[in-house]
Image (cartoon, grey):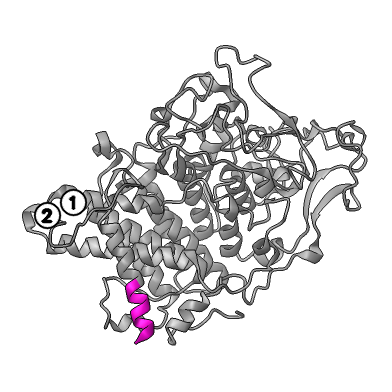
Amino acid sequence: MKSKIIIFKTLLLIGLALSSSCEQDLGDNFAQTELTEATFFKTSNDFKLYSNNYYGSLPAHGLWGREDWSDLTTSVNGNVISRGEHVTGFNSGVWDNSYALIRSTSTLIEKIEEADSELRSSIGQYKGESHFFRGMAYFNLLRQFGGVPLIDHTLSIDSQELNAPRNSREEIVAFIISELKLATDHLLLKDELGGDDNGRVTKGAAFAFLSRVALFEGTWQKYHGGSDSQRLLQEAITASEQVMNDTYELFDRRDVLGDDNYKYLFTLDKKQANPANLTKSDNNEFILSARRDLDEKPHNSRPDPVNGLNPTKKLVDMFLCTDGLPVESSPLFKGKSKIDSEYENRDSRMLMSVPLTVYYNSQQAAWTRNWSDLNDPTRGTLNLVEIPGRTATGYITLKFMLENEQPNGSDYPVIRLAEVLLNFAEATYELNGSISDGDLDKSVNQLRERVGLPSLTNAFVAENGLNMLNEIRRERAVELFAEGFRYDDLRRWKTAETELPKPMLGIKYGGTEWETHENWASLTPNLDAEGFIIVDPASNRRFDPKKHYLFPLPLRQLQLNDELEQNPGW
């Protein structure tokens, strides 16, 4: 009984805290009041205020740590998950926060069902949001732990579910998909929202997230063993097409931003943050974002090289040359003998994601632009790369980096159209073993055209000895770099056991201009036989396929519930 009381009181307090706090802006809490269920949930606005709290659970500028779990970035101090050194913890924020959100959303769903019919007709949007966020919470649990206890209603102190065993992975996936489809029944289209409701979850967001979930699990079952892969991949395609037929569009203002278009997509604000003075209202690519506001809810977050997101050689080599070919086969590739030679004739996203020989101090603006004179030499501070003090690899992340002073009000893309296009292309190929040029034009080629790359076609792949699936996955890696997808991608493809044990490499130092340049000639880095900096040798890295595809359940939950079974190997 003690374990039941502890877990019940924890969930009850979290639920009451959420239901008694209101906000003026999505995800922004202010003072709690002495509200009770007897006095609350009486008006449409009460349900809206309650549901506003869900938005604080959206991932924001902070997925960079999860990015370092993978093979494309690292930090000066390394990463225990990327190395396979993580251990079973007593608590888990993913577990606790997810179940807190599940209780909160279940509360509102039940209150809506209890409301008068006249009131229910005006609060359908908030029911849709509740199903959406409950589905998102269960997806966070699924990708971390696999099957977990499935709770679809609020619990009392005597609820048997407090000591329930884990539901199967298949049951959790089915529930998530059901939740997202229920959400689409109640949510509004983007163009139906207006005024203060802009930024709320839309029907398009639910379909987009459904495409993410179905692709994740469809490929997981395909490569890890499962009987429902084809149906799930078709779900991903259908959901993606719902979004692609909506009014979202890729951000493409090359007419005024040139090749910097991709970079500025992630730093739009309501103050001038780009040469064309475009603002967030000019962006129709973000389907759901963690919203910030310069005046009401600013933030000071951006990549800090010391703490992570040092791009590796592997990422840099993924960017294609301008002829659409990889560096290993393109005659346009200029090699790495000079500091800037590998940047020549490359996908413009490379320079917009991984800048050349400069880093930005995490305590100040990258630079403070004089937007009336873009060549003003006093615009701010640019610093030469410090190896290994500021970056272990010699490369620095530019994506999400600002060019004006802090604080700022740029939004973080939780879901954007580019991901949905990639979901569509990958699911189509995984389902059929092929993809038509027409479907490539609807998806991947829109992203390639935006950065000036030639179209990907079946003939091009055949003529150049490429692999279509690899090229689709490459496009995903470079387009969604630093947005928190890579580690999950490696796990669902079941390639983590191959890719993560490999050494982490940085710039080519030996035998290049780096080695003789006055700024870096005094370095004594550990080099491999080809002259690349060894950031993390293979001897430091491991991935045990018998255990590392899932995380361990937190020890506290195992103590509280004897029916929970730990994941294999932990």
Q: Would residue 231 be seen by someone viewing this image from the given angle?
A: no
Q: Residues within 10 Å of mark 1 (few under 14, many from 20)?
A: some
Q: Where's residue 541, x and y in %?
A: 75, 65
Q: Where's residue 84, x and y in %?
A: 68, 67
Q: Which residues are magenta?
A: 1-9
Q: Where's residue 399, x and y in %?
A: 59, 38
Q: In the drawing, does residue 124 fall left or right of residue 562?
A: left
Give the residue displayed 63% in from the left and 48% down from the top: 474
Q: Would residue 410 be seen by someone viewing this image from the given angle?
A: yes
Q: Quote the CA–CA distance across marks 2 and 1.
A: 7 Å
Q: Residue 70 lies in what quarter of the image?
A: bottom right
Q: Secondary structure at mark 1?
A: helix
Q: Where's residue 38, x and y in %?
A: 13, 62
Front-most of residues 437 and 77: 77
Give the residue displayed 79% in from the left and 45% down from the top: 388
Amino acid of disc 1: Asp
Report the residue marked by disc 2: 42
Amino acid of disc 2: Lys
Please tell me the numbered disc located at residue 205.
Answer: none
Tags 2 and 1 touching, CB below 8 Å:
yes
Q: Secondary structure at mark 2?
A: loop
For the C terminus, give its image quadrant: bottom right
Prevailing secondary structure class for the magenta stretch in the rendered image: helix
Residue 50 counted in the magenta span: no
Q: Residue 262 lies in what quarter of the image?
A: top right
Numbered circles on residues, count: 2
Front-most of residues 226 and 212: 212
Please tell me the numbered disc located at residue 46.
Answer: 1
Compared to residue 201, the image places residue 217 above or below, namely below
Give the residue displayed 39% in from the left and 59% down from the top: 136
